[in-house]
Amino acid sequence: MEILIILVIAFLLFGPKELPEIGKQVGKAVKGFKETADDLRQSVEPEINMIQQEVKMVEQDFESSIKEAEETVKGAGDSATSGINDGPKMG
């Protein structure tokens, strides 16, 4: 519906003789915009992929560090528990 309104306004403003030329210019502009967007996408996409890979590596390193920390804490807790159980007995 909006396109129809725009076409009617363009027809009234420019007349039937200039309308085809304006349509060609708009078409060229849209084509140029699409080409520019495609070029931009092609140049940015590899960077985005590289960043995603780096994020995955950092995430894996973080998960590994968390796992090591949990094992260290668990080991320290086990040592403390066995030290308490093996300690001197009063009696």
Image: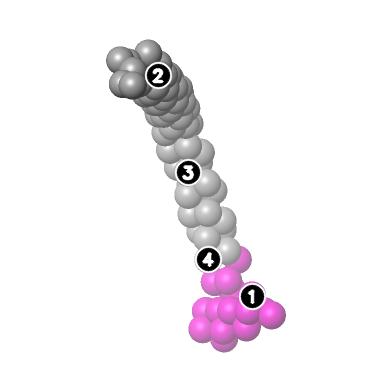
Mark 3–mark 1 Cα distance, whole angstroms, equals 23 Å
Residue under the point 51% across and 83% down = 13
The numbered mark, 3 or 2, whose residue comes first in the sequence reads 3
Instruction: State which tag comes first along the sequence, 4 or 3.
Output: 4
* Residue that label 4 marks: 22
Pick the residue in front: 25 or 52. Answer: 52
The extreme front residue here reads 91
Q: Is residue 9 magenta?
A: yes
Badge nearest the viewer, 3 or 1: 3
For label 3, the crowd category at 10 Å Cα-Cα, with few meaning under 14, some 14 to 19 and many 20 or more, is few
Is residue 23 shown to the viewer in this render? yes
- Labels 4 & 1 near each other (Cβ < 8 A): no
Image quarter of the C terminus: top left
Label number found at residue 85: 2
Q: Amino acid at mark 3?
A: Ala
Q: Is residue 32 left or right of residue 66?
A: right
Q: Residues within 10 Å of mark 4 (few under 14, many from 20)?
A: few
Q: Which residue is mark 1?
A: 3
Taking the spot 48% from the left edge, 49% from the top edge, the residue there is: 33
44 horizontally vs 4: left or right = left
What percent of the width, then of the height, locates residue 71?
A: 42, 19
Magenta segment boundaries in residue numbering: 1-21
